[in-house]
Amino acid sequence: MSRYVTRKFDYDKKDQLALEETLFHNANGYIGVRGNLEEGVPAAMHTMRGVYLNGVCETIPMKQAESLCNLTEEKETMVNVGDIQTVKIFIDGQEFSLFEGEKCQQTRILDMDQGTTNRDVTWNLSEGRKVKISVKKMASFVEESLFVLEYSVTAVGFDGKMKLVSYHIPEVCNYANPDDPRLAAEGASYLRTERIETRGKATGLSVTSTEKTKIKVGIMSDHQWNVRPESEEIRVENDEIIYEAIIPLESDKTSTCSKIVIFKDSIREKDVYGKLSETMDIVRKKTLDYYFESQRFFLEKFWNSSEVRIPGDEKLENALNFNIFQLLQSAPQDYYCSIAAKGLSGEGYEGHYFWDTEMFMLPFYVLSEPQVAKRLLEFRYETLGPALENAKLLGHKKGALYPWRTINGKECSGYYVSGSAAYHINGDIAYGVVQYYFATGDYQFIRDKGARILLETARLWMDVGNYHDGSFHIHGVTGPDEYTCLVDDNYYTNRIAQFNLMWAVKAARLMEEKGDFDQFSLDNKLTADELKEMEMAANAMEILYDENLKINPQDSSFLSKPLWDLEATDKSEFPLLLHYHPLHLYRYQVCKQADTVMAYYLFPDLEDQETMENSYRYYEKITTHDSSLSECIYSVVASRLGMKEKAYSYFGDSAKLDLENLHGNTKDGIHTANMGGSYIALVYGFAGLVIREEGLRFKPFLPDKWEGYSFKFQYRGKTYEFSIDKDGARVLYDGENITEADKIKILQ
Amino acid sequence: MSRYVTRKFDYDKKDQLALEETLFHNANGYIGVRGNLEEGVPAAMHTMRGVYLNGVCETIPMKQAESLCNLTEEKETMVNVGDIQTVKIFIDGQEFSLFEGEKCQQTRILDMDQGTTNRDVTWNLSEGRKVKISVKKMASFVEESLFVLEYSVTAVGFDGKMKLVSYHIPEVCNYANPDDPRLAAEGASYLRTERIETRGKATGLSVTSTEKTKIKVGIMSDHQWNVRPESEEIRVENDEIIYEAIIPLESDKTSTCSKIVIFKDSIREKDVYGKLSETMDIVRKKTLDYYFESQRFFLEKFWNSSEVRIPGDEKLENALNFNIFQLLQSAPQDYYCSIAAKGLSGEGYEGHYFWDTEMFMLPFYVLSEPQVAKRLLEFRYETLGPALENAKLLGHKKGALYPWRTINGKECSGYYVSGSAAYHINGDIAYGVVQYYFATGDYQFIRDKGARILLETARLWMDVGNYHDGSFHIHGVTGPDEYTCLVDDNYYTNRIAQFNLMWAVKAARLMEEKGDFDQFSLDNKLTADELKEMEMAANAMEILYDENLKINPQDSSFLSKPLWDLEATDKSEFPLLLHYHPLHLYRYQVCKQADTVMAYYLFPDLEDQETMENSYRYYEKITTHDSSLSECIYSVVASRLGMKEKAYSYFGDSAKLDLENLHGNTKDGIHTANMGGSYIALVYGFAGLVIREEGLRFKPFLPDKWEGYSFKFQYRGKTYEFSIDKDGARVLYDGENITEADKIKILQ
């Protein structure tokens, strides 16, 4: 079975170009290259031309309309690091373009087994001549700094002469939407050239740097041919490196130019300039074939441990594996960065990392790529410093508050009401730490890094909360639902804070057992009293319950607000956030996304079935799913509550969101969190997986429309396969039934 | 007795210059001229050089850090309309400056009987020569477009030659604070010259206009001498009009140049250009003596009906009359404008009008200048259109929502959390309408304008509130206390909304009695059912009471928050808003200003004494008075509750706030609301005045330190005098005791 996504170009579909730039982007967690047309597009067409390196960002001002104490007034933004995609060809003087002359036939393919994208064009030249163009691109999973672009040209039944011009442009602009008056008409350029040079006839090299963050970016490009060029030269012109080659085209013979590009940055390398040549030499030596081949091997291994199968529903299966592949493309190769809301596929949300990572993506990595899960959590550990600083800015006397949106660890949210006030991110990260620990048993991580995250996040809850009438209350925060902000005792927040506090204590106990506590307590000025207070607060946490409706209220005032009548709301008014002032939304019982229901997903055993069912039905009626993070959670909780139809329906919408562009904005980048969410809906929902301290528990069901489904996962260092069909569910290890020692239970 | 304020210039006091620019500004409700030194100041000195015309503003962008639906993204700002103050003199070639050569002696006087400011300088020239300079300025109360600057020079015991250069600069910049990085280093200039010309030898004329609001400003300046100039000329140079005269100075004889300036704008006049000459001709014909004299007459009349006396405490008496005089200087002469937070004395708060007008200033005008009170309410009527529009932007289906800060009626608040969300402004305006009606019996105003204000503001409450558990709730608003935002059932808001709803109904009934209801209901699509619903909601209004503390909670969640320990807070941390993130402040029981306590001032009969006393003591402990609107209210309620010492102490701080620069920021402009507040503290507090439908009620007391106090006031067209001494209180009309028909009661 081969896994791929393909699209034929349709001249009549207006947004297809930008949409395909996202769908066919190449990324390896470090490099992200939008799937732009190499030759460029006419000026009037909507395109976002970009190459990104995970973590490479610039600080830009973000003025507040009214200045208040410690409001965020600058932010990081992901930098477009250069244009290395642009390749133009001229055959007998005629320049190739998809949009001039007779229409071309174009097919694009994302090959998820080879780890490449392919673009195949039949170009109809003048006088009935045809040329086949084929472009293969790869961001290597094996050598993270390597991107390859292979440009192949075949003149069909005629001889000709081709000029190929390839660009390496170190200073480019970030995306600007001319329709949005709040953006500059011209996008900003954040890099300044420090060094630009050529070597020999086919190699270019540039080093640029940002002004504020002082990050250097190095790019080296090289060109190789399978035929001998009649002539070739490379030159620097207006701060651009331009490579030109003349190739005699022989009828029906394919001429291929392989453009090898190496990226380095000063976040990861001291000697950016030197490392470029060093890596290029290694790559040249190993040859590109090696990298194409090792890419295939890498993916074979990946699919062997991560693939999902849904026999009989190829479409959904493919959608889900597409999502999984994108999670792989987004996965960092080190702890200097995390995963942006749009991965490395576009500039939506400016490349910022959110709670999306821990809550929606981590559950996949924990089961499929635990080393990625670890890196993601290590990133949070590495940015504990700015989180401690952020807590101080918010007035707290102790603890760390993780930023709502960030690249380098600092808060980048300009609207604190649904940004910094979403304190639950602290608990979300703590939850991620513990899930990772449960799934891997990696005590060393807890001891060295995790426990400190748990402690400092827990300390914040102690500072933010207060006792009143015997309960521990959390005032003035915003839960996951961004249509209800600055509330008291948000159910989700209090639950995750409770967990956070409990696990700060549990981690300490664990270290006590292992003899590591004394050092830890010394390093962190932690006393037994402080732990006791945390435990007390966790136990006294205010958990709201409404006797009348028999549900958990979203927060202390939610149920006294008027209900928003979603059925009576015109379709054109969605998403509500684009049509209503936030103050208006906040005044109603209306939810952008799962909030209380999301808490049930995380903590399936803390409320009785009746309460969860009542709440589910109550909140579902007032949830708009205007956030792409909503439906997957409604699916997983529906599964858990036995609402199979609902679970299936929500799952489908979530799985196909980007592939079918269901939210209409995939052109700005993939919805990475939702991709993880669709995985969650299947594995944690349909299969009913719960990861606990004492082991895994599945409580699976098979959707009526399916014959079965299966997926691979890793647990404590071993790769298992879960499968279910009409005959029941099973988990196999190496083809054999598991034993008690595997600590995996299936409740049939 | 003469009323004046005087200050000797002290070279060692750093901020005195800017402070005096405020204290000695000239205004008449239309024109405001900062008390700048005519000759200018050295570049390094802090100065705000400005002339303002009430209502003349420009629209400027106010970008939000993150864009959300219908957030305000532009605002009005008061425009500095030109420089007509600059006059330089040169004697025998030496230029006058306060800051070069030997130090000068300077005394400034605000003469509140003459309605002028005077600046008297002894300038020590080289070679032991002395020159007396005297500058008198006046903004005429009689001719609103007239400003006069008389520049007099006397050479003491020597003959000399003087050159006087007088400027008329139509394009100037608004103030920019170079220490504030959020302001442009260079202030913006909002006017473009359309016409600039000279006439004869001493007259200049300019017409400028704003780009966005398209307001034209016309200025005409003329120069007259009491001596014959040796030569004079006027010219246009670089878009500035420059007048130059050479005067032979005869020993000990005073030469005076009278600069007459006329201002016109297109808000009020169609033919700005034409009206300038027309008014100038009238002024020239009547002579300046006439205007100086009529200014004195005007003030004699004013003080006869408005003066406050505190025999034996001249200092406080003078402070209070200074405040009253500033209220007069700020009082609009028409309904095209209102009163800015800083009056016309400076650019603090950008010339915006707030609830300050109705809640803190109107109580003075209602009793002293009812025609001003009417104009202020008419301004709200005239801006009902934008208020209806504003309600729509906030998502409401009906009603009007007045802007929190505005110049032309549109919302100019960039931070809606403590801006637009302060819905109580609707009720504040409604309260003002009703107080005006009670004090004047002006039914015609209710019928023609007031009832519509009451109706549309009441309609908003019906849309914003909802029933829950049998009560009518108001969610997601911000009360007066800006340290606690976006709350539910704020006591103050619910009380004022209740009043607003009741009075929409009462006004309708009143019109029914008078036979005017049918037309009104037709014009406003008002049904009996709608009124019934309003009455029901008013009666069902949620009014919080805490059984335990026996107080009215500020809002539904206030009492469950932790108490801020103000005593343990270091003095350097005040005002808290400059040291704590808003989110942090919102999470504590801490008040910037009177909130629940303020409701007791407005509605003294709705809670029992015990509840009010308990609340007062509870909130006082957690109120920082970081707002200048707080102490006056704490004073008035202390009076009402019989806490005489507290009442007196809060009163003193309020009365002297600007005169003694107690908040340290009077340089940016006067605190007009607090000036009204100090009047309230005396009249509504010490004298215990309550204005009710059935008449006035005084419940006075005499502070222990005083021998007595008295004030004049108007009620239903007659001027009364209230006085109190050790023998008791009395109200006299025309020197005689009042009768039952006067409907004024004193509870001794």
Image (cartoon, coloured by chain):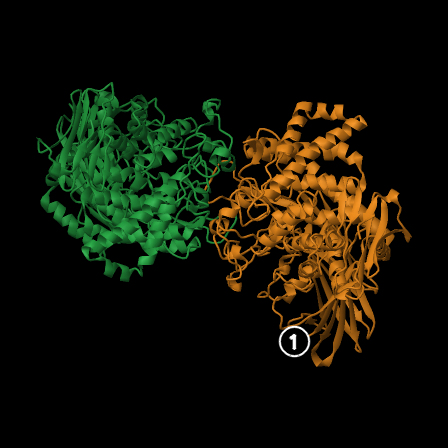
Chain colours: A orange, B green
- Label count reads 1
Question: From the viewer's perspective, is B71 left or right of B268?
Answer: right
Judging depth in this view, the residue of B711 and A9 nearest the camera is B711
Judging depth in this view, the residue of A652 and A194 nearest the camera is A652
Q: Quadrant of residue B46?
A: top left
How far across and how far down the image is residue B722, in percent? 16, 30
Q: Is residue A20 visible in this depiction of the protein? A: yes
Vertical relation: A654 (above or below) B564: below
Residue at the extreme bottom of the image, as rendered: A127
Quadrant (top left, top right, bottom left, bottom right) of the N terminus of chain A: bottom right
Question: From the viewer's perspective, is B233 left or right of B632?
Answer: left
How far across and how far down the image is residue B566, in percent? 46, 25
How far across and how far down the image is residue A250, in percent? 82, 73
Q: Is residue B216 visible in this depiction of the protein? A: no
Judging depth in this view, the residue of A40 and A741 nearest the camera is A741
Vertical relation: A7 (above or below) A197: below
Q: Residues within 10 Å of mark 1 (few under 14, many from 20)?
A: few
How far across and how far down the image is residue B329, in percent? 23, 38
Residue at the extreme front of the image, as rendered: A548
* Callout 1 secondary element: loop
Question: From the viewer's perspective, is B721 left or right of A231?
Answer: left
Question: Label 1 marks which chain's residue?
Answer: A
Vertical relation: A185 (above or below) A213: below
Residue under circle 1?
A101
Q: Amino acid at mark 1?
A: Gly
Residue in view at x 61 percent, y 54 percent: A617
